[in-house]
């Protein structure tokens, strides 16, 4: 009996992708690849499906392979297109500028002498955003206009994203009205349904980011609602989670804090497979929401996780300290944030301009008034007023007016009580002896002849445990068990913290992901060398920061002695908890005793196994 032949794995994968069953399509394509049934021409499909199914590292790796196959086949335009896709995913989902520049350079070299193609438009789009994120607004606008010109003839989606890039550069330079006109044009093109799903999501997200950064929340809410209507049927990849973050911010501003928190939590869950440093964006939004709800501990937890991801958690952490009554710590934190602003590139936040300082200035006014420093409060309020005027923002103008009112009210009563730490009695400790001792609600810390008192924190207990046995590795679970009054190693009392218990989700990074991280590190080293060769100090500093970030990510996944860390396990939960607690304690110590803080920063190693590893050439003894 004859009949139609069974569909191949590739045909079944295409059918699954057509009905948006991304995981099924991905599984079928990887099976087909293992069976040798995929040709180089099928790699773009695998890359796109992998992205939709939440496998970003696979997406980038497959586009890299497609690039190599096209180069070997002598197809320069297709190779440039694959290089542009690598650069685009690196930019939009990792914000690692050094690898982005490397892949863009490859694409541009391949396009020399070629007639205009859609690839030219996409290279211009990614280059415009690369310039935008590093603050080169003029070059960003030039590349955006090239994307619009070429894309209008060859790639409408690239033209639409180019309009958003040009609009954002104009807004950041203060030409707000013209920028808003271009944003509206890009939005209209999106609503018309002319663009593919990924490009539609990018335009929506970029449009709302620009409006929220400007404080145009009425327009931002309109476009957020448009995103919400479109998202259930069109959003793929990280767009789902990005939509939720925008929604959470609108709900927070409306005062619907419970619903906002739920959206922020879902956003964090959905964005974890995609984002690296920018995972700090939804985490910081979660922290802001929880702080408004009065959940200070929950806010701090979210903000510290954002910090661990490589994101600037200020002014959130400073406001957490203020909420606790730790005014001196809050003031020190906000002053440091204003004096040394984060240079981490972000697609979601305004480039490092006055707009990015506005939230810091708002917090500074409140904190400095509490600290009794009205001169600093007045200076912050005046700067905020200038920012609001330049960017024609009603929301920022209202914030500036509130700040001025707070300062004037405080000037009528300049006596402000602030918490004061009890000055230590030098006679309590022998001079020159190192000590790390608990005294009630404080810890007495002596180092290099200086003694300070620091308020009790959980992380201080962990540090004391490590100082007691230099060079010994202590498992994070042991620290948690001992601190909570549980049993010593081998007899832990908390079932959920059993080292080999259920919940182990495997290695945090598989071999494929580790290889991807190492390739990125190699690309960053190349960018650093190029920056040195041309004397671009700023570029070199940024690339070095990206290198440090990736090295930390690898160290989080691979512990002391090269051990792979497990994701989702009790061990991993303990590692994260101990790391956050120790980091918080070190921040507190640095504020009160900078030299001790510096010593511990270099000597304390956290992870699944923690240790105190002082310089063996300078032996230290601690009174505990």
Image (cartoon, helix red, strand yellow):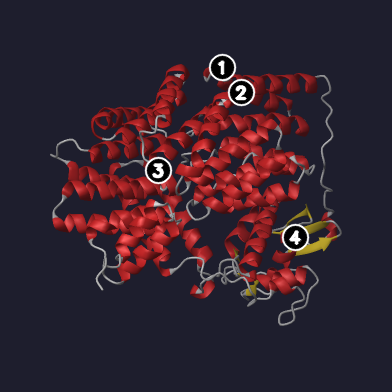
- Decide if residue 156 is on the left or right side of residue 259: left
> 234 above or below 367?
below
As helix, strand or loop, the secondary structure at mark 3 comes to helix
Q: Are marks 4 and 2 in contact (CB under 8 Å)?
A: no
Q: CA distance from mark 2 to mark 3?
A: 32 Å
- The label shown at residue 320 is none
- Decide if residue 49 is on the left or right side of residue 245: left
As helix, strand or loop, the secondary structure at mark 2 comes to helix
Q: Which of label 4 and label 3 is nearer to you?
A: 3
As helix, strand or loop, the secondary structure at mark 1 comes to helix
Residue plotted at (64% across, 39% down): 315
- Decide if residue 150 is on the left or right side of residue 162: left
Please name the residue that numbered disc 1 is placed on.
389
Q: Which of label 2 and label 3 is nearer to you?
A: 3
Please name the residue that numbered disc 2 is placed on.
396
Residue plotted at (42% across, 52% down): 20
Residue 159 image-quadrant placement: top left
Q: CA distance from mark 1 to mark 4?
A: 45 Å
Quadrant including the C terminus: bottom right
Please name the residue that numbered disc 4 is placed on.
458
Q: Are marks 1 and 4 in contact (CB under 8 Å)?
A: no
User: Where in the figure is residue 571, as x and y percent of width and height?
Assistant: 63, 70
As helix, strand or loop, the secondary structure at mark 4 comes to helix
User: Where in the figure is residue 109, as x and y percent of width and height?
Assistant: 19, 44
- The label shown at residue 198 is 3
């Amino acid at each position: 009996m004859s009949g139609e032949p069974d569909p191949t794995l590739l045909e079944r994968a295409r059918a699954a992708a057509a009905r948006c069953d991304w995981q099924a399509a991905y599984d079928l394509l990887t099976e087909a690849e293992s069976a040798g049934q995929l040709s180089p021409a099928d790699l773009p499909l695998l890359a796109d499906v992998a992205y939709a199914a939440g496998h970003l590292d696979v997406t980038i790796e497959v586009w890299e392979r497609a690039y190599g196959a096209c180069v070997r086949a002598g197809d320069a335009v297709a190779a440039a297109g694959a290089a542009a896709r690598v650069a685009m995913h690196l930019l939009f989902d990792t914000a690692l500028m050094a690898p982005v520049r490397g892949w863009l350079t490859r694409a541009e070299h391949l396009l020399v002498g070629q007639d205009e193609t859609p690839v030219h438009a996409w290279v211009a789009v990614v280059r415009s955003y690369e310039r935008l994120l590093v603050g080169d607004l003029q070059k960003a606008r030039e590349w955006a206009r090239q994307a619009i010109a070429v894309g209008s003839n060859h790639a409408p989606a690239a033209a639409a994203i180019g309009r958003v890039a040009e609009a954002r550069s104009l807004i950041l330079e203060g030409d707000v009205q013209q920028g808003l006109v271009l944003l509206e044009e890009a939005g209209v093109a999106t609503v018309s349904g002319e663009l593919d799903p990924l490009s539609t999501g990018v335009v929506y997200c970029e449009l709302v980011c620009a409006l929220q950064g400007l404080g145009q929340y009425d327009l931002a809410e309109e476009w957020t609602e448009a995103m919400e209507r479109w998202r259930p049927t069109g959003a793929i990849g990280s767009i789902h989670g990005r939509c939720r973050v925008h929604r959470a911010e609108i709900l927070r501003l409306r005062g619907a804090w419970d619903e906002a928190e739920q959206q922020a939590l879902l956003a964090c869950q959905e964005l974890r497979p995609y984002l690296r440093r920018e995972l700090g964006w939804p985490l910081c939004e979660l922290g802001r929401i929880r702080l408004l709800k009065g959940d200070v501990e929950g806010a701090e937890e979210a903000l510290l996780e954002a910090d661990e991801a490589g994101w600037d958690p200020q002014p959130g952490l400073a406001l957490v300290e203020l909420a606790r009554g730790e005014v001196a710590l809050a003031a020190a934190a906000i002053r440091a944030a204003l004096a040394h602003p984060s240079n981490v590139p972000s697609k979601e936040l305004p480039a490092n301009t006055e707009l990015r300082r506005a939230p810091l200035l708002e917090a500074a006014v409140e904190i400095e008034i509490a600290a009794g420093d009205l001169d600093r409060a007045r200076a912050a309020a005046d700067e905020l007023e200038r920012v609001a005027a330049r960017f024609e923002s009603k929301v920022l103008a209202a914030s500036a007016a509130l700040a001025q009112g707070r300062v004037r009210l405080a000037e009528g009563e300049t006596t402000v009580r602030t918490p004061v730490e009890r000055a230590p009695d030098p006679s309590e400790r022998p001079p020159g002896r190192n000590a790390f001792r608990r005294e009630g609600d404080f810890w007495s810390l002596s180092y290099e002849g200086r003694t300070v008192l620091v308020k009790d924190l959980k992380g201080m207990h962990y540090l004391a445990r490590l100082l007691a046995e230099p060079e010994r590795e202590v498992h994070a679970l042991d620290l948690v068990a001992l601190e909570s009054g549980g049993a010593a190693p081998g007899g832990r009392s908390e079932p959920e913290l059993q080292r080999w218990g259920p919940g182990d989700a495997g290695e945090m990074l598989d071999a494929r992901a580790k290889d991807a991280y190492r390739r990125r590190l190699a690309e960053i080293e190349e960018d650093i060398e190029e920056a040195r060769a041309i004397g671009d100090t700023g570029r070199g500093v940024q690339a070095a920061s990206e290198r440090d970030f990736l090295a930390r990510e690898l160290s989080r996944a691979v512990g002391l002695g090269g051990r792979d860390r497990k994701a989702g396990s009790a061990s991993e939960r303990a590692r994260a908890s101990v790391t956050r607690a120790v980091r918080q304690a070190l921040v507190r110590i640095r504020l009160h005793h900078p030299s001790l803080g510096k010593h511990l920063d270099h000597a304390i190693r956290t992870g699944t196994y923690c240790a105190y590893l002082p310089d063996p050439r300078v032996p230290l003894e601690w009174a505990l």
